[in-house]
Image (tube, rainbow, N blue to C red):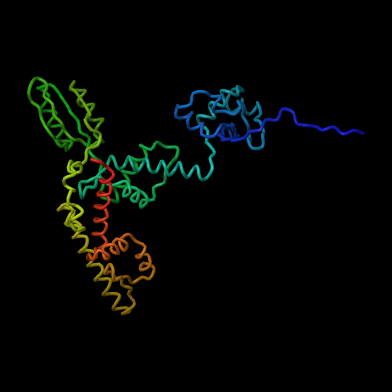
Amino acid sequence: MSRTLVQPVGQKRLTNVAVVRLKKHGTRFEIACYKNKVLSWRSGVEKDLDEVLQSHTVYSNVSKGILSKSKELLQAFGTDDQTQICLEILDKGELQVAGKERESQLSNQFRDIATIVMQKTFNTETQRPYTIGMIERLMRDIHFAVDPHSNSKKQALEVIHELQKHFPIKRSPMRLRIGVLEKDFASLLEKLNVWNASITSKDESGSHPSVICEVDPGLYRDCSEFVSSLQGRFEVLAYSVHVEEDTHVDHYDDYDDAPSGPSRLPKESADSVSQLSENLQKQTTISGGNGNAKAEGKQNKCSTCNASFGDANGFRDHFKSDWHKHNVKRKTRQLPPLTEEECMADIEVEDLKSDLKDYSF
């Protein structure tokens, strides 16, 4: 009896597959796509469907090669047209990606959100914008988690709203040029006063006087509707306005020769830092007195930062903090130690200085 070699006929090998999955009416449907093409299709870069789909076939399990039944397709989608169903799954389905790829996407989106927040906000104490590194640290402090299915700009606005509850941060105002008829100019100024808008300049010459002002971005829609009701002109000059001193490099020419510390900060910031340091010293004195009353000699003291810690875990964590590391650097330069609040202010100034070095003038 002769043996014949039976070879499979009609097998299709699916390699380099990205699976897009959609669950509808309790049934799972999957399609096989090429990697790195699904996102291009959804962003509108790729127009050819054949460059995205490996086959115009709907599966219930791509890895096992199980096809979906026509009865399930009719029940879920109302049609058995495979191409039309593939388009719906491609637009609404969830892309299955590897762990490292997903982590990379979330990291990039986290950076994009932090960049948008940096561009739209400023520090209310120093009147200067935050650096990208400081924004990322603040986002981690509030335990912000990126939603991959939501828009980065929408999430950035939510982050700003959440950061305002815990930190001195505020949205940068918009700069607008508004022109109205001469009879409506008084009502316009009254409305701007109600909105607490900052008027930069006025031009009352001619029959169409105009004003350049800075308004909170949350009032953009109301301002636009009000100007439209007066049949005036409305122009956006800048979406985000920061302090003009930040654009001048002359202010930082002698920065390297100047001593670090709160003396280089604005007066309001220095006053707030000194007040916080006094409160911190009072708390340290009170806690030190209680500790000596209970058990004298059990406190752990850091000679570099000139601070005491009654808890051993807090003492160990202190050596990993930015406060201790910054004071170690100051000690090597034979500079006196800073308190924790003064240290944070000093780090902020150094971040601003490092950002300026990224620009060439």
Assign the C terminus to one quadrant of the image: top left
Q: Which residue is farthest right?
A: 1
- Vertical arrangement, residue 7 with respect to residue 105, above or below: above
Assign the N terminus to one quadrant of the image: top right
* Left or right position of 121 against 264: right
Comparing 100 with 156, the one in front is 100
Q: Which residue is farthest left?
A: 205
> What residue sits 18% from the left and 20% below the top?
231
Comparing 283 with 322, the one in front is 322
- Vertical arrangement, residue 356 with respect to residue 177, above or below: below
> What residue sits 19% from the left and 52% below the top?
255
The total of numbered circles placed on residues is: 0
| Rendering quarter of residue 155 | top left
Residue 278 in percent (x, y) is at 20, 64
> What residue sits 52% from the left and 45% below the top?
99
* Left or right position of 159 against 238: right
Residue 215 in percent (x, y) is at 20, 35
Residue 67 in percent (x, y) is at 66, 31
